[in-house]
Image: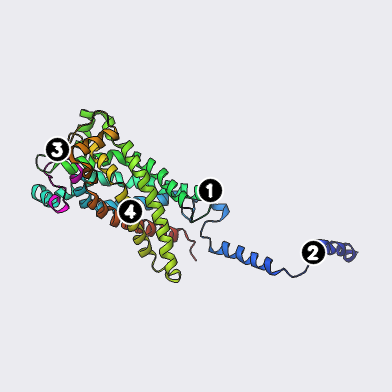
């Protein structure tokens, strides 16, 4: 009886269909298998703990923080030269040339003058870049819809990232630039906290964010160009030799980052000059602006120095951002790889 009762169950339509799958079905199954085995993202049950790429959200923040500090610390002397060149009427710089500016800094303050304000940079760069990269990764995942070639999503993600990270970075960037201008012996400020206290006492809290609007206006197109160029260059470089892409990963990230940084820096130099002017008001002969309007600063620069004044510091700016972006992206990707390997289950 057991046999006769069981036999109808094994004769159902679903279980009796044993025909071989078609070639199209086999191809679909192979594609599904490849997408599962090649996708580095975490499994569905771990989605609530991981962001994407197999990393926790804090690991993106840590990677970004390490990359930002490495970038700005390594290139800080070039940033000091650029800041001095962009501050109209600032002493001791009277020439817009890179080498005269460098010689003047070394003559007045010595080698230490190139690193004045680096502590403020360290305090601002770490947290700001943690926000910068984590927001970028979060927005890129949401806006791209899983399409790695969606350059508009990369650009928009970069804009979102810069708006939030600039809110963190702008106050310390202002302190850093004032220290870069104030000189060593007998300077306006003795250090980071002395600068913070003096600015707050004499100019109020709003002075720390006097350039925030200009910074966002500058960094929004800068970041849009930067990220879109970086992702496109990375894809192009990887496609040249896909078989050795893993071995050359560091070179690819560095090269793509350098190209993206240089292009974005060149395009946005005029706004960077305006930002420097707003952040260094009243320091070492710099003009003060009553309204803080971008338009008013543009007019002042053009009246005093002509249209060429809007390009002050473009050479050191590109000299800064090309290697800085190479350092930043290669460090960021290396840190991500470290955390990804750390998350891998031990065999």
Residue drawn at 26 percent across, 37 percent down = 298
Q: Is residue 39 left or right of residue 184?
A: right
Task: Please give the label number shown on residue 15.
Answer: 2
**Viewer-side residue, 283 vs 186:** 283
Residue under numbered circle 4: 263
The Cα–Cα distance between marks 1 and 3, rounded to whole angstroms, is: 53 Å
Q: Give the mark, 1 or 3, whose residue is nearer the N terminus.
A: 1
Residue under numbered circle 1: 48
Q: Is residue 138 left or right of residue 278?
A: right
The Cα–Cα distance between marks 1 and 2, rounded to whole angstroms, is: 37 Å
Q: Quadrant of the N terminus?
A: bottom right
Residue range highlighted in magenta: 84-101
- Crowdedness near tag 4: few (<14), some (14–19) or many (≥20) residues, C-alpha within 10 Å: some
Q: Is residue 305 above or below residue 75?
A: above
Of badges 4 and 1, nearer the viewer stands 4
User: Where residue 69 sits in the image (x, y, percent)?
Assistant: 30, 51
Of badges 1 and 2, nearer the viewer stands 2
**Viewer-side residue, 231 vs 301:** 301
Residue under numbered circle 3: 284
Q: Secondary structure at mark 2?
A: helix
Disc 4 to disc 3: CB gap under 8 Å:
no
User: Where residue 35 sits in the image (x, y, percent)?
Assistant: 57, 62
Disc 1 to disc 3: CB gap under 8 Å:
no
Of badges 4 and 2, nearer the viewer stands 4
- Crowdedness near tag 1: few (<14), some (14–19) or many (≥20) residues, C-alpha within 10 Å: few
The Cα–Cα distance between marks 4 and 1, rounded to whole angstroms, is: 38 Å
């Amino acid at each position: 009886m057991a046999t006769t009762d069981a036999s109808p169950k094994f004769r159902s339509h679903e279980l009796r269909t044993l025909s071989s799958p078609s070639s199209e079905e086999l191809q679909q199954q192979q594609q599904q298998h490849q997408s599962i085995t090649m996708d580095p993202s975490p499994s569905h049950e771990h989605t609530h703990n991981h962001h994407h790429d197999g990393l926790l959200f804090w690991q993106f923040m840590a990677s970004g923080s390490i990359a930002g500090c490495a970038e700005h610390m390594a290139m800080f002397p070039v940033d000091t030269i650029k800041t001095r060149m962009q501050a109209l009427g600032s002493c001791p710089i009277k020439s817009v040339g890179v080498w005269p500016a460098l010689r003047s800094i070394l003559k007045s303050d010595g080698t230490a003058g190139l690193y004045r304000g680096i502590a403020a940079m360290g305090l601002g760069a770490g947290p700001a870049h943690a926000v910068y990269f984590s927001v970028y990764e979060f927005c890129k995942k949401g806006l791209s819809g899983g399409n790695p070639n969606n350059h508009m999503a990369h650009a928009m993600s970069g804009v979102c990232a810069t708006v939030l990270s600039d809110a963190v970075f702008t106050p310390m960037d202002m302190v850093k630039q004032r220290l870069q201008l104030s000189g060593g012996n007998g300077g306006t400020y003795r250090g980071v906290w002395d600068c913070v206290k003096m600015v707050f006492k004499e100019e109020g809290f709003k002075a720390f964010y006097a350039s925030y609007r200009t910074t966002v206006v500058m960094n929004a197109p800068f970041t849009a160009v930067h990220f879109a160029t970086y992702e496109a260059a990375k894809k192009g470089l990887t496609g040249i030799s896909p078989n050795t892409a893993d071995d050359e990963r560091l070179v690819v990230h560095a090269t793509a980052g350098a190209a993206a940084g240089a292009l974005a820096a060149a395009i946005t130099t005029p706004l960077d000059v305006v930002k420097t002017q707003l952040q260094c008001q009243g320091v070492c002969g710099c003009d003060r602006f009553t309204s803080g309007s971008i338009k008013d600063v543009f007019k002042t620069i053009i009246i005093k120095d002509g249209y060429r004044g809007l390009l002050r510091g473009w050479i050191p700016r590109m000299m800064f951002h090309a290697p800085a972006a190479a350092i930043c992206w290669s460090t960021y990707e290396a840190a991500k790889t470290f955390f990804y390997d750390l998350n891998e289950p031990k065999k």
